[in-house]
Image (cartoon, helix red, strand yellow):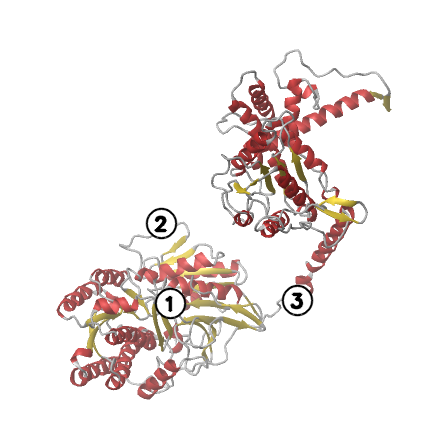
Amino acid sequence: MPEFPGWDHSGEFTEAYRKAVRGRSRLSKRGPKHPPVVLRTGPEEAQQALEALELGLQRSSRARGIVPCTPYAHVDWRGGSRTELIARIAEQLRENAPDEAGRLRLPAYDLLRDVADHEAGTDAQLADRVFARHRGRTTAVLPTRDTTGPTLNAGFMTVPLRSLWSLAERLHLKLWELGWEWRLARRRRFRLLWPENYRGKRTYAAALDEFRRTWEAAVRPGGDTRDAERWDGLLLTALMTDLYAHARQGLLHPGRRRRRPRHALLLNGTRPGPGGGDGGSTAVTGFVRLYAELQRPGPNAATVVVAALPDTHDAAPGAGTLEEAARRLDPPKGAIPTPYEVRLPRPEPGSRSVAVLPVWTPWVRLRPGRELALEAGALAVALWLAGQLAWIPYLGSPFTDTYTRCLTGSDYVGRPESPGPGLPTQYADALDMIAEQNRVAETQGRPERTVTIAHVRASMAANEAERRSGGAVPELRGLALAQRSLHRLAPANDNGIWVRIKTYDAGVQFANAREVAAEVVREAKKDQHLIGVTGFTESRKETVEALRVLNSARIPIVSSTATAKAMEVGRYYHGAAPNNKREARVVAEFVRRANTVRTGSDSCAPAEGVAVVTDPTDVYSDELGKEFARNFRSTGSRIGYIPGGNSGVVVPNESDLDMKFSMSEVAEAVCGRVAGKRNTLVYWTSRVREFDNFLETYQSLSKCANRDLTVVGGNELTNAALSGGFVGKSWLRLYHTAHMLPAGHPDRSATAKAFHDAYTEEFTGSDLWLNDGHAALAHDAVQVLAQATSQANAAGVELSRPNVQQIVNSGSFDLEGASGRLRFAAGSLQRPLNKLLTVLHHGKDGSAPVLMCGDPGKNIDAGKEWRQGGTTYGCPEDE
């Protein structure tokens, strides 16, 4: 039994060789490509090494003795051209191919050989008529039909059988040519058979002409060596293409398990020629070089080449070791294959040879026919089961989700029993609370640890309903509570700070926001301890412009309830609330799965269609509507409405926007959508004033009055719902979002509970704005700036705006707030990562949470999924 010579690292090399040949995955198509390895050694050692490697390519069979594991060629080349060497390799690959893997077909290589043989007149295997048709010979025609011989009588017709045979032969030849024309023009792996600069039409006839010209140039007497190089390259390319096609087994091919190993080429070029000279070394060297050149652009990754060449003095000047060769036989995917040479002297006396085990042995010994029968049976069973399971949705099977109960909450947040003092009074009291805490900062705070935060607010609305649903009062309360908590902790903490809050009135709906921002910039130039700005509760064009002014002045901003992504004007802006992109993703996923649209007296179903109502001139409304439509494809055109008419307003010309110019038109459009498509709900992104108007118009003027209507809205509707704004509308099913967990929710953090206790102690547990989120977000916005300032103080740096901004933008800022965790991680510096968002169902008993997505606090395992019946759904996370 031949064994691999005992060179250093022989065991590693033979094992790497076995893995390279054996380890091809069934799904592997193009890589990795293994570089050819050249062993520079003597004839005896070369023969022993290659015979040992050949032995590993064979295995024992109970029925037929020793059989090959994979197609391989072991050639001891003693003299001849490279063209003849390639022919010998193809011949041996056919001889040493496993019967179980199917016949090794080399169609492209055979076509080239047939072209050469036909031109040389030695062995025209293809019919002469095939070539005659494309060589331009006027005298070469197909033979006429011979009508002599037996006939076939079919009623009144008599058809000569010879003519039928001739027609069948012509049809066979035509189909054969069309098949080759499709391969040469369409199949990627056959493109390498064409010259790089070929610009003509890639037909079968053109390919034959190109092959013929290449062969004629190669055999022309006194021709250039480059012509012979091109012909050999064409032959080798065709051979590699065929080997790659053979390795690309199909899913149902019976030989696919047996085609997993790579093909192996073992070439011995160390033999001397019959009359002396270099023997086969020149041809083998040329083959290895040409193979390496063609391997890079070609797709073939299913061949391993090991060649042996004589160790001459001028050969392999930078030869490596078998250890490195073993590593080269395990290349990473995408590595460029280059030949690797190893210089191997005669092994040391007493060195131990290495036995090469078979590269592959099947675990289950099945003949291809039996394996194909098993696969056909398995496919038939799979199709039968698929047909049976297809009826499950119509049979009420327990495997289907038949849960149709309407999604409602359990822990309802009650409405306030009494309105309390007048709203203007409560507004003034909240401002007095801030003024009181400012006096504490002035009188009790240490000057070096006292900072100023500017607060930009809108004027109080004139309409009583808007005052109740707005966030002016709770926002001021949240600021004051944040100040008070900071001032209580500051004396006992070396890094604690005192905060002055200077409020700026920006007018109704922030009409004067830009002018106020300019005033803040002027104030910041005078006061270096003005560390940032908060407020900006609404996403409007005016607030966006004001934020640009502040960002240009490099003043840190932490807004409270504003959610539009358009507010994120630069790196100095941060928001405490999740933006519209996150809210739209979460709500779209919720609407797609939740049983929200009523289908019976006590049954609901997920929405199949959504009518989006939006104000295209409002930053918040327009952006939220577009983001939702992007995440929920079955919305159709958005219904646009501009409050107060469109006089003097440029109506956007958008293909997916259906503009309406009165609320009655909006109601009719919504009614048409709801009545026209089953399980349709309304996604309301406009402001709450327009929503109240819509409900009255929908019920009084539309044809859908008193019919169930499901509406999903943003936090604009939250305050109105919590204050009892939609009581008495039994036909309305309302879901609205909020930015905090309601009081009493078990997954609140310690900070959220402490804030709730402080709020109820100051304003009672029946307060109108206890659960709306405005106070919590305002509290957290101040805490972000204060925490950053405290960290700057701990680091021993100046309490200035650049240092505060640097800490918030460090990528590791993490704060547990009353509205959830605020983690400004790398990649999400403008909004907290996975900020908490809840969806509440509004019913006759109040509002109750039905979905919570986001991070409620550190080490709280909640907000990752939500449940409906017995099914759990994952929450979308920030990208």
Tell me which residue sits at (40%, 53%) in the image.
657
Marks 3 and 1 sit apart, C-alpha to C-alpha, by 37 Å
* Quarter assignment of residue 128: top right
The crowding category of the residue bearing disc 1, from other C-alpha atoms within 10 Å (few below 14, some 14 to 19, many at least 20), is many
Select label 2 or label 1 by which is in front: 1
- Relative to 13, say whether 227 is above or below: above
Q: Amino acid at mark 1?
A: Pro
Residue 855 makes an appearance in the image: yes
- Relative to 479, say whether 83 is above or below: above
- x%, y% of residue 781? 30, 73
Q: How many marks?
A: 3
Would residue 655 be found to the left or right of residue 195 on screen?
left
Say what secondary structure mark 3 lies in. loop
Q: Amino acid at mark 3?
A: Phe
Would residue 769 be found to the left or right of residue 89 on screen?
left
The crowding category of the residue bearing disc 2, from other C-alpha atoms within 10 Å (few below 14, some 14 to 19, many at least 20), is few
Q: Amino acid at mark 2?
A: Asn
Say what secondary structure mark 1 lies in. loop
Q: Earlier in the sequence, mark 2 or mark 1?
A: 1
Residue 578's label in the rendered image is 1
Q: Are marks 2 and 3 in contact (CB under 8 Å)?
A: no
Q: Earlier in the sequence, mark 3 or mark 1?
A: 3
Residue 668 makes an appearance in the image: no
Marks 2 and 1 sit apart, C-alpha to C-alpha, by 29 Å
Q: Earlier in the sequence, mark 2 or mark 3?
A: 3
Marks 2 and 3 sit apart, C-alpha to C-alpha, by 48 Å
The residue where tag 3 is placed is 399
The crowding category of the residue bearing disc 3, from other C-alpha atoms within 10 Å (few below 14, some 14 to 19, many at least 20), is few
- x%, y% of residue 759? 33, 84
Residue 653's label in the rendered image is 2
